[in-house]
Amino acid sequence: MAIDVLIAEDEPSILESLDFILRRAGWTISAVTDGDAALDAVRRLKPRVLVLDVMLPKRSGFEVLKQIRADVETRALPVLILTAKGQQQDRRIAEEFGADVFVTKPYANADVVGAVRHLLGRDAGTS
């Protein structure tokens, strides 16, 4: 079964918050807590959007994004990058690797929901 949003986040409180706000917005959610699991889940679950933290165990969000964009099966997946850093360098790297949206922690719930809604809306024409 395809899911709407896959969350890759290793911080339990942030993961719980994201899961709650995105489910409340009406989407089906799955979550993983490391980069390797994120790549596996993207291929297995075929989410409509990936919410990807930069700082993940095993494989960084940037590495995950780079692999997603290099794979013809997952290349078109909309990706929202989350980072606590908010540094220009992170934003530049995320854009170079093909991130669709970049949200800095701490974030407003409405910003994340709005970004996911935007990405899902853009995806709706292709499914």
Image (tube, rainbow, N blue to C red):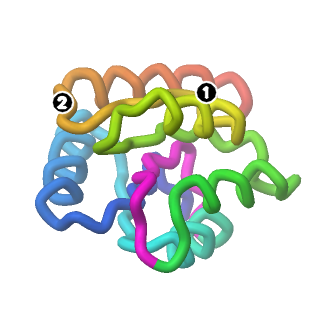
Please tell me which residue is depicted at 18% across the width and 36% down the height of the picture: 106
Please tell me which residue is depicted at 18% across the width and 30% down the height of the picture: 109
Hey, what amino acid is under mark 2?
Asn
Could you say where residue 63 lies in the image, as x and y percent from the top left? 63, 60
Could you say where residue 89 lies in the image, as x and y percent from the top left? 52, 34
Residue 51: say if magenta: yes
Which mark is drawn over residue 124?
A: 1
Determine whether the residue tagged by mark 1 lies in a helix, strand or loop.
helix
Could you say where residue 78 lies in the image, as x and y percent from the top left? 60, 37
Callout 2 crowding tier (Cα within 10 Å): few <14, some 14–19, many ≥20:
few
Mark 1 or 2, nearer chain start? 2
Compared to residue 62, the image places residue 12 above or below, namely: below
Quick check: 96 left or right of 111? right
Quick check: 119 left or right of 98? left
Foreground mark, 1 or 2, reads: 2
**Foreground: 114 or 54?**
54
Residue 54: say if magenta: yes
**Foreground: 20 or 80?**
80
Could you say where residue 96 lies in the image, as x and y percent from the top left? 71, 34
Q: Is residue 120 visible in this depiction of the protein?
A: no
Please tell me which residue is depicted at 34% across the width and 21% down the height of the picture: 114
Q: Which residues are magenta?
A: 45-57
**What residue occupies the far right of the structure in this picture?**
72
Quadrant in the rendering for residue 103 = top left
Please tell me which residue is depicted at 40% across the width and 32% down the height of the picture: 87
**Foreground: 45 or 18?**
18
Hey, what amino acid is under mark 1?
Ala
Which quarter of the figure is the N terminus placed in? bottom right
Compared to residue 3, the image places residue 76 above or below, namely: above
Q: Which residue is mark 2?
A: 109
